[in-house]
């Protein structure tokens, strides 16, 4: 099986969010998919398999579980199909079929890939007790709400996002998948910033989280009164995203860089 390691939402190697992408010629059982994802030990391993109708089956696995949606690994998968393996014309969209997130369409736009994802508005939920203390910030902390992918909390400013040092064992109890923290950007080049923590999914801090921006786009559109944003995720590796809210869909845009190419020998 051909495989690549790709830095997504990155313009140079060793930034953005790395994802492994595995090209399947046939179906593969879930236990083996999970074992391979654990072997790669990346935030996500994406499996792609071409279907008879020309679309692509796509699934995503963390080192410990399968997830219903992943932005950076979708970007990596599209990059691999078009630019690495040359299995799709760059002038045509890559159409992915997923288990829980429907059809996802990716288009090559210049040096970037634009991805069409479902918008995921947050539903109201209670603010976790001792949220500021457990995040390692002074607060105040505002609970934006919850989605199947994440709990989103807003902090007063970018400085609080940067200094946050969550107690991972505690925030793992807040949501089954992950926790996003967000604030307005202090840099005029960006509209908002964020970080994403998912110790409950085997990812203490995710470098750049596309799926989180499907709810962040809805929240920041209401706060800022606009629908197009430039976002930055403030992990140690850092990453930049173009984000547009189009009704019930979100377009995410980013670049990708291949850092490894190989074959699975098992």
Image (tube, helix red, strand yellow):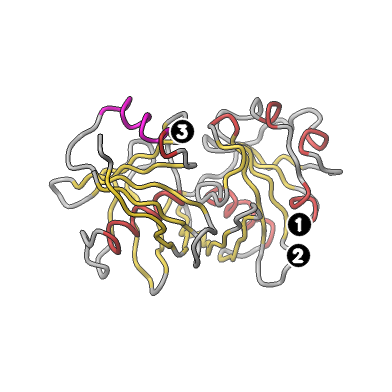
Q: CA distance from mark 3 to mark 2?
A: 34 Å
* Contact, mark 3 vs mark 1 (Cβ under 8 Å): no
Q: What are the residue bounds of the magenta stretch?
A: 29-38
Tell me which numbered mark, 3 or 2, is placed earlier along the sequence. Answer: 3
Compare residues 233 and 144 and report the one nearer the observer.
233
**At 47% from the left edge and 63% from the top edge, which residue is drawn?**
254
Please tell me how crowded label 2 is: few (under 14), some (14-19), or many (20+) other residues with Cα within 10 Å. few
* Residue 63 disc label: 3
Q: CA distance from mark 3 to mark 1?
A: 30 Å
Q: Is residue 3 left or right of residue 153?
A: left
Tell me which numbered mark, 3 or 1, is placed earlier along the sequence. Answer: 3
Could you say where residue 232 lies in the image, as x and y percent from the top left?
A: 62, 60
109 relative to 185, above or below: below
* Rendering quarter of residue 189: bottom right
Compare residues 246 and 233 and report the one nearer the observer.
233
User: Residue beneath label 2, please?
Assistant: 186
Tell me which numbered mark, 2 or 1, is placed earlier along the sequence. Answer: 1
* Residue 37 disc label: none
Please tell me how crowded label 3 is: few (under 14), some (14-19), or many (20+) other residues with Cα within 10 Å. many
Main SS of the magenta part reads: helix
* Contact, mark 3 vs mark 2 (Cβ under 8 Å): no
Does the magenta run of residues contain 36? yes
Numbered marks: total: 3
Q: Which label sits in the foreground, 3 or 2?
A: 3
**At 46% from the left edge and 59% from the top edge, which residue is drawn?**
251
Per the image, label 1 sits on a secondary structure element best described as: helix
**At 64% from the left edge and 28% from the top edge, which residue is drawn?**
172
* Residue 158 disc label: 1
* Rendering quarter of residue 35: top left
Q: Is residue 41 left or right of residue 189?
A: left
* Contact, mark 2 vs mark 1 (Cβ under 8 Å): yes
């Amino acid at each position: 099986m051909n495989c690549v390691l790709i830095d997504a939402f990155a313009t140079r190697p060793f930034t953005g969010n790395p994802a492994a992408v595995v090209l399947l010629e046939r179906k593969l059982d879930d236990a083996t998919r999970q074992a391979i994802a654990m072997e790669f030990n990346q935030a996500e391993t994406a499996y792609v398999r071409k279907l008879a109708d020309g679309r692509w089956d796509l699934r995503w696995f963390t080192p410990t579980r399968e997830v219903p949606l992943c932005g950076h690994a979708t970007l990596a998968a599209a990059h691999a199909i078009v630019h690495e393996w040359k299995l799709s014309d760059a002038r045509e969209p890559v159409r992915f079929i997923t288990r829980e997130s429907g059809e996802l369409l990716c288009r090559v736009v210049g040096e970037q890939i634009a991805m069409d994802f479902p918008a995921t508005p947050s539903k109201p939920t209670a603010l976790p007790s001792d949220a500021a203390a457990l995040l390692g910030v002074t607060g105040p902390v505002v609970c934006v709400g919850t989605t199947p992918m994440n709990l989103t909390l807003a902090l007063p400013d970018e400085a609080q996002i940067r200094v946050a040092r969550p107690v991972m064992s505690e925030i793992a109890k807040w949501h089954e998948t992950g926790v996003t923290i967000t604030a307005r950007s202090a840099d005029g080049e960006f509209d908002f910033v964020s970080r994403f923590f998912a110790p409950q999914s085997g990812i203490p801090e995710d470098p750049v989280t596309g799926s989180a921006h499907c709810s962040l786009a809805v929240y920041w559109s209401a706060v800022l009164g606009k629908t197009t944003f430039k976002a930055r995720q403030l992990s140690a590796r850092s990453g930049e995203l173009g984000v547009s809210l189009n009704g019930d869909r979100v377009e995410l845009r980013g670049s990708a860089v291949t850092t490894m190419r190989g074959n699975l020998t098992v």
